Image (cartoon, grey):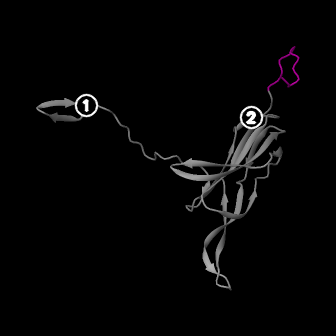
Amino acid sequence: PLKINAGGNTALTKQIEIEVTDGGSKQIKGSGDTQGIFAESLLSQKNTYVGQPVLYTFYLYFRDQIARPNLTLPDFKGIAATELKNPSSYTKNINGVSYNVLEKKVLLTPQKAGRYDFDPALLVYEAGAGVRRDVFGFPETVFQRKSLRTESLSLDVKEMPPVPQGLDYSGFA
């Protein structure tokens, strides 16, 4: 409590408790440099059943302009993979910093039970590395080739449970 003396009177504030923890800022798993760009990939779920769709999403977070991005998604061997339409883009605030975000989504539908390990997604791009003068003396941006990798992901797929005897069930609701 805080003790306050005013005009010959003493007052006490109510005691409050504060818990201080290490690492209070949100960390996003993924990769990137400290130049305002990073990437991550996520699965909508890590455990599923044969035939049950799972959403794979690649996220690119960036503050500065990038040029000639080339994204290589993992090879989804043994799984029917359908890239969803145009990537979405929006702005997101992370730890007080505003990032442009691009999302690329792939619908995965496993055909067989088992564990599937997906390699990291790879993004190769060019970023501005400074300014120089061209042959006519005009300023031009110098680009440097860079790359980002996400973390590897795994998906565990189980067989559908057997249909109880006497129940007429086709697998469709």
**Residue 166 coordinates in the image, percent (x, y):** 87, 13
Does 63 appear above or below 14?
below
Looking at numbered disc 2 in the image, what kind of residue is underneath it?
Answer: Thr
In terms of secondary structure, what is the magenta stretch mainly?
loop
Q: Are marks 1 and 2 in contact (CB under 8 Å)?
A: no
Q: Quadrant of the N terminus?
A: top left
List the residue tagged with mark 1: 13
Residue 171 belongs to the span the image colors magenta = yes
Residue extending furthest bottom? 135
- Secondary structure beneath dot 2 equals strand
Front one among 115 and 23: 23
Question: Dot 1: within a 10 Å radius of its alpha carbon, few (fewer than 14), some, or many (20 or more) residues?
Answer: few
Instruction: Determine the image quadrant of residue 170.
Output: top right
Q: Is residue 110 left or right of residue 94?
A: right
Front one among 73 and 127: 127
Instruction: Tell me which residue sits at (79%, 34%) in the image.
Output: 52
Residue 26 visible? The answer is yes
Residue range in magenta is 161-173
**Residue 128 coordinates in the image, percent (x, y):** 63, 69
**Residue 132 coordinates in the image, percent (x, y):** 62, 79
Residue 6 belongs to the span the image colors magenta = no
Q: Quadrant of the C terminus?
A: top right
Instruction: Determine the image quadrant of residue 45.
Output: top right
- Secondary structure beneath dot 1 equals loop
- Mark closer to the observer (1, 2): 1
Front one among 5 and 49: 5
Mark nearer the N terminus (1 vs 2): 1
Instruction: Tell me which residue sits at (12%, 33%) in the image.
Output: 7
List the residue tagged with mark 2: 48
